[in-house]
């Protein structure tokens, strides 16, 4: 298994933050995105093939006041799910977008 992971939080002004995270590697499917893809697949000869993936997100958190804040987030996921081993009906990519307003 080979992988790389990086993340950051950058302060913007007094309280706002820019958040980012990225992960890439082989055999990570069961550990990322709630097992959206498998970590590996067996071929017809019983050989195990690790599945490559890349995923990450970017988000921005803004504080309107002491009790009210918003976040905007984008996340992307892609996997090299080889159809020759896994068949055609497997997950290959996903995207997620969110915008919220929270009161604490």
Image: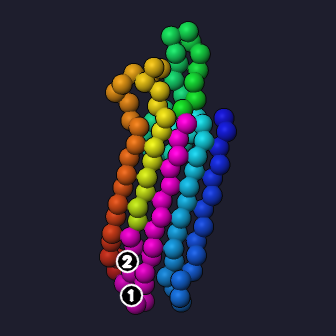
Q: In the image as oriented, which residue stretches furthest toward the top?
A: 45
Q: Residues within 10 Å of mark 2 (few under 14, many from 20)?
A: some
In the rendered image, which quarter is residue 100 located in?
Answer: bottom left
On whether residue 68 falls in the magenta region, the answer is: yes
Does dot 1 land on a helix, a strand or a loop? Answer: loop
In the rendered image, which quarter is residue 49 located in?
Answer: top right
Secondary structure mostly seen in the magenta stretch:
strand
Q: Nearer the viewer, residue 65 or 24?
A: 24
Image-based side of 98 in relation to 8, left or right: left
Label 2 with label 1: CB-CB less than 8 Å? yes
Instruction: Using the rendered image of the protein, determine whether residue 35 is visible from the camera's viewpoint.
Output: no
Mark number for residue 75?
A: none
Q: Residue at x 58, y 21 (%)?
A: 48
On whether residue 25 falls in the magenta region, the answer is: no
Q: Position of residue 22 (x, y in %)?
A: 56, 55
Q: Residue at x 48, y 39 (%)?
A: 79
Q: Residues within 10 Å of mark 1 (few under 14, many from 20)?
A: few
Residue segment shown in magenta? 52-72
Residue topped by disc 1: 64
Q: Nearer the viewer, residue 30 or 45?
A: 45
Mark number for residue 70?
A: 2
């Amino acid at each position: 298994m080979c992988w790389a992971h990086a993340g950051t939080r950058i302060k913007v002004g007094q309280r706002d933050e820019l958040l980012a995270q990225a992960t890439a590697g082989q055999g990570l499917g069961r550990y990322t995105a709630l097992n959206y893809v498998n970590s590996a697949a067996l071929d017809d000869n019983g050989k195990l093939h690790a599945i490559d993936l890349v995923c990450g997100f970017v988000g921005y958190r803004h504080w309107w006041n002491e009790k009210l804040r918003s976040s905007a987030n984008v996340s992307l996921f892609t996997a090299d799910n080889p159809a020759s081993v896994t068949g055609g009906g497997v997950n290959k990519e996903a995207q997620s977008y969110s915008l919220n307003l929270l009161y604490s």
